[in-house]
Amino acid sequence: MSDDSEAVLHDIEWKIIEHGWAVVAVGEGDDSAAFAYTVGLHDKGLPELFISALPPSVAQPVLNDAARRHLETPLVPGEPVFDLIVGYEMVAIEMDDNGPLYVARALESIDVRALQLVYPDAQRRFPWEEGCALTQQQLYGSRR
């Protein structure tokens, strides 16, 4: 592991100590949309939270709000989550693939569990519904 990687992990560990969790944001790549996720909830017995295809400036406050709620009353896969994005219902789905959660796997567990927060398009259609206009929001699990 490089010195830069160790410094990033150390910084995230301090954020977890100070705030209870940290949000890690990964920018858009050539073949992938941006995504962000929490680190630190796993050690409290909860799944981490993940969201894709939102800019970090939007994803971070959404995940911080969701993490606070999750600590008070754990989110349930398949159940709606209201007002993380004003006026929109989201749904938490269990992630089958935790591959994108690099830092959580490095700091907590290779088997870290996570819930993906999925949001609808402007017509309130979710990615699993016909006609959904969101093509960038990759799903890492399915609605059960």
Image (tube, rainbow, N blue to C red):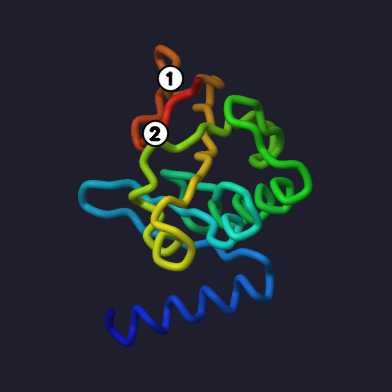
- Cα–Cα span, label 1 and label 2: 9 Å
Could you tell me the amino acid type at mark 2? Leu
Residue nearest the viewer, comparing 98 with 124: 98
* Residue drawn 45% across the image and 15% down it: 129
Secondary structure, mark 2, is loop
Could you tell me the amino acid type at mark 1? Trp
In which quadrant of the rendered view does residue 88 lie? top right
Contact (Cβ within 8 Å) of mark 1 with mark 2: yes
Q: Decide: is 96 above or below 5.
A: above
Residue nearest the viewer, comparing 117 with 58: 117
Residue nearest the viewer, comparing 132 with 26: 26
Q: Decide: is 89 above or below 7.
A: above
In which quadrant of the rendered view does residue 29 lie? bottom left
Q: Where is residue 8 in the image (x, y as percent from the top left)?
A: 42, 78
Considering every residue shown, the one lying at the far bottom of the view is 3
Q: Name the residue under label 1.
A: 128
Mark toward the start of the polypeptide (1 vs 2): 1
Other residues around mark 1 within 10 Å, as few (<14) / some (14–19) / many (≥20)? few
Other residues around mark 2 within 10 Å, as few (<14) / some (14–19) / many (≥20)? some
* Residue drawn 61% across the image and 56% down it: 41
Residue nearest the viewer, comparing 124 with 95: 95
Q: Decide: is 93 above or below 60.
A: above
Q: Mark 2 points at which residue?
A: 139
Secondary structure, mark 1, is loop
* Residue drawn 53% across the image and 61% down it: 39
Q: Position of residue 87 (x, y in %)?
A: 69, 32
Q: Position of residue 121 (x, y in %)?
A: 50, 27
Q: Where is residue 55 in the image (x, y as percent from the top left)?
A: 46, 53
